[in-house]
Image (cartoon, rainbow, N blue to C red):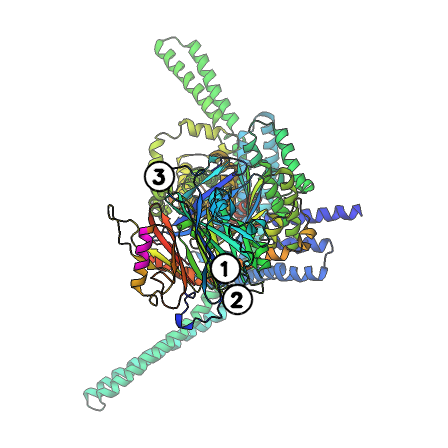
Amino acid sequence: MSEQTRIEKIKYGLLKTIDVSGFKVFDPVVRLIFGEEPQKQVKDITRFMLMPIVFVCCCLVAWNFIAPRHKTKSGEVPTPAQVWNALTINDTLYDRENEKESDFALSDDQREAKIEEVKTLIETKESESTKLKEELATIEASAKQKKAEALAPLQAEYSELKTTHKEARAKRKIEAESLAEAVTKKKATTEELLTFLRDSSRLKEDEKEKEQIIKDQIAEINNEKPKSLQAAQMASDSAATEVQHLKKRLDYLSSGNRSLKVAKAKDSASSALTELESAKSPAEILAAANTVVKNEERASKIAKQEYPRASTIWFQMWRSLFTVFIGFVLAAVVAIPIGIMCGLNRVAMACLTPIISIFKPVSPVVWLLIFQIVVGAFFPNPETHPFFVFLNSLPIIGRLNANPALIFSACTVAMCALWPALVNTALGVSSVEKDHMNVAKVLRLGLWSRLTKIIIPSSLPLMFAGLRISLGVGWMVLIAAEALSSSEGLGKFVWDEYQNGSSLTFSNILLACFVIGIIGFILDRIMIVLQRAVSFDDGAATV
Amino acid sequence: MSKNTSNRYVEISNLTKAYPNPFGRDIEVVKDFNMILKKGEIVSVIGHSGCGKSTVLTMVAGLNPISAGELAVEGKQISGPGPDRSVVFQSPCLLPWMTTLENVMLGVKQCYPHGTRKQRRQICEHYLNLVGLADSMHKYPREMSGGMQQRVGIARAIALKPQVLLLDEPFGRLDSLTRMDLQDTILEILDREKITTMVITHDVDEAIYMSDRICMMTNGPEATVGQILEVPFARPRVRADVLDHPRYYDFRFALIAFLEKQEHSKDAHIQAVHEKLQQGSEEPVSA
Amino acid sequence: MTTMTLEPSTLTSELLTLINYVEVWTLPATDESESQSVLQLDHAYVIGREDVRRLDSTGRNGLGEGIAGSAWKQQRPVILQGENSAVLQHVIDISGLPIEVLLAIPVYRDYQLVNVVVFGLTAGCGGVEIWSRDDRDELAISGSYYEGLSSFEFISQYVRFPKGAGVPGACWKDGRPRIIAQPHAAPNFIRSFDKDPAQLSQCIGLPIGREYGFAGSVILLLSDEAKPLARNFNLWQCESSTPTEGDTNPAVRFTSSSLDTSDLGSDWCQSVCDRVAIDRQTLLLTSGSDGLPVGFRFGVVIPFFCNESIDDLAVLLF
């Protein structure tokens, strides 16, 4: 009996968690596991889980089918596989940046050990790479041969066609000339000559068309790249880049390494110092002393230097998340108190209504430009500004390269995300149930306890609904703002990809599209969970 | 006029509620409502729905501004809401984000500002015990039935140690079994605590069973006291005894006859008031 | 508000009125205090089936003595009924008359008692109620007599009327008498007598009090169609209540508020009004004296004063 109640407890606990987190779809799965009405659950699972999955798969298939058939300026529309591939490529890019970064910072024994490791890796990879290159060469050769074989008859046909057509044309020319003569002698009418010329021109068109068909066929064969060749090329390319990457790493471990650079600077400083001691003339002394100081400065500067990371999609993602968080917090901090004030006081509401109605529909782009100017004025020298120095010295946030661009992006987000939160808070506060306010009146609660005990708790669900909309709006606005202002983030990633036009461009943009979408979804889910947690009844709607 | 405060514990004189009428004279929903309550008395106010009984109660509670007239408790003029007149609303009006105990505590904190937390808690527990909710102190309103929620509402009102308890159709939304149960609970508490009580109801049997006198209201607009009926049954009352009383149905008939008469004369009355509003004459409506 | 009017032509000798005995007591205006002055019985009439008989008897009642004296003392109407010893000890022996109940109505002028009118009521369907103010400023029954209205009687003892509520409350509020015809249909008549076998068709409310605008008590007279209180019961309302100063014979105009007086003739009305305005007390109309309309044998006119001026007149014709 107790065992059973324990299981029941677990079951209902799980169900409640699922409910609160808004994943009601999994409800039948849990029930099925606990053996509750299996038939009904299976039915529910097929209806509400399998069907969506099947539908999404259908969409993927359709995408896969349609994409290659649409040719654009920047190549074919990528298929799902290509987007997936782009994901792995971006991922390895990220990993490599990480490796290089750690290599740059290594020193002493660890560095030595790493050099050995990388060197052996290079050896194996290089041999692999050469092998792959050889394979590629043979495959290429065979492909060429195959192509030549396929082309030979076509080309023969083409030249033959061309000669026959040439002859036909010459013949027609002579005929026309004779006909013209006949006209002068009145043996034929001009009408006949014109008809003949029209016919011959039509024939010429036909001949050209025939030639073109064969020409197209030849071009197609020429352009054709057998799958095996493609794969071999790709494998050899990736091996080559891998080798290149390893060589770069070696560089960062040896000459480009921070500790070595520091040591070098220090060395030159100490050598300058010995020079200083041996120097005689005042000019020599001064020069040597100068060198010492300069090198010392350099050494300390290098020691503080960070690896100059290339921005990858994941870095951009974290940066965007941080920006949107700052913007969202800003919006909430401004919107909630003002919203409460508006909800409580009709005069305040009346005062703010014109401001809200005028600024709410303003495009984020305008806000972006305004904040770019305004924020820029606050930080004339961002590198040394204590605020950014402080932010960048923080453990995790420091890696995100806080700069004025981050602040004005965040401000833009806040400005656009402000309104839903404000309006909803005001609505929530002003629509506190009259009964509850009566309770407060009868109990003669003071303003503070009225706020904390009744008004805020009862308006929390609406408030959070507003914040949820705010976060969604903020996330959308942020991406656009980043794309426009080239502030680091996912928006900039998309914009850069669009601008640099490599073979991966289109895939990367689609990849970014999915990343943005999924993050937006996760943020929304988090807000739903929060909203549920503060709701005293089953208020929040699932979407 | 004697100033005997226990015989004239609550004095409601010429209570009037007028709402502005943009096209004529103000519409007086309740006009010249007079009532005097003895200390410890339970008075029901009965009338057709919409006649203004709840308006009277909310005015007495101070939740609805008084257009004209006066209200005195224990000889002192009263205006505005206060814990000396606690209200049990038709809907339980519990704060859904608080447990039963916290809901009761909210008011107790206001009324016993000098008590320690423990003392206040004991007070809350005592009253929750009285209404039979000792086991549900930490439940949230959504986890309880309507009847239980209303019990919390009653405990919250009584825990304030009010001079006057105002019940605004407190059982209106409950099924009849729960309703009877709750009536008995309230009567039991009132018999013990002797709180002067005003009950708004539209249930004839409830009015007879619960109250010492019944105030019948005429239909609005310009609703006022139409008649008062003393209910002489001794306290504490036992429901079965009251129902079996040979004269019970005379009381019941008197109430129903009054209500029916109001219903019949409604149209004529409304017509008269309407004409008066249009003419703007000073003549009182003589029916 | 109609009924009560009886066309003189339709009068038959069979008709009996509920009131069948009238006494008028007068308090002579003296400088002495109340305790030293004495009520004098001026007139006593028995209204029989065929004629009106004047009883030649004089009586004196001190404060609190007899029914008239106790009405004087209590400052409100008094009811005595049945075998009550006080009835039997009345100055006039009425034990031989078919009188069920005696009702004494004090008449005040400027806070002073002027008359006490005593009505004797015969058996018949109806009732008399005296509503007096209690300590909660509500009207409660302080004396009553009913016939054939047991449920009504029972519930009435628990009923209270605040100012303005019901017929008694309305009389209290404006200080004026009123006639309610068909009370079961009248919105103002709140109590229901539907449960009782007897049906009331007429209700008369008379405010009795010493102060302006304040009725210490209200008399409610209830009767059915078959046996009205009087053959004609009229209430007249004063038009201009303030008599012109220095004018010994003020022209006071009255309009009937309750009944059509055209049958009685407006001239006759005016003459009666003028007489009351001169006497400033209860007026008796006997067949011997002039001024009784054709077909009637007897009449009583009770004035309702507001300070010195007459507000209303109740005219009972038999």
State yes or no: residue C275 in magenta: yes
Q: Which mark is residue A149?
A: 2
> Which sits in the foreground, B105 or C208?
C208
> Which sits in the foreground, C240 or A445?
C240
User: Where residue B209 appears, x then y in whole percent?
Assistant: 63, 50
CB atoms of marks 3 and 1 within 8 Å = no
Of the two numbered discs 2 and 1 in the rendering, the one whose residue sits closer to the viewer: 1
Of the two numbered discs 2 and 3 in the rendering, the one whose residue sits closer to the viewer: 3
> Which sits in the foreground, C180 or B141?
C180
Mark 2 vs mark 1, CA separation in Å: 132 Å
Q: Which residues are magenta?
A: C271-278
Query: Which corner quadrant of the image does residue B126 belong to?
Result: top right
Q: Chain of mark 2?
A: A
Instruction: Point out the image quarter for the C terminus of chain A.
Output: bottom right
Mark 2 vs mark 3, CA separation in Å: 63 Å
Disc 3 residue type (three-letter): Gln
State yes or no: residue C123 in magenta: no
Magenta segment's dominant SS is: helix
Q: Which mark is residue A372?
A: 3
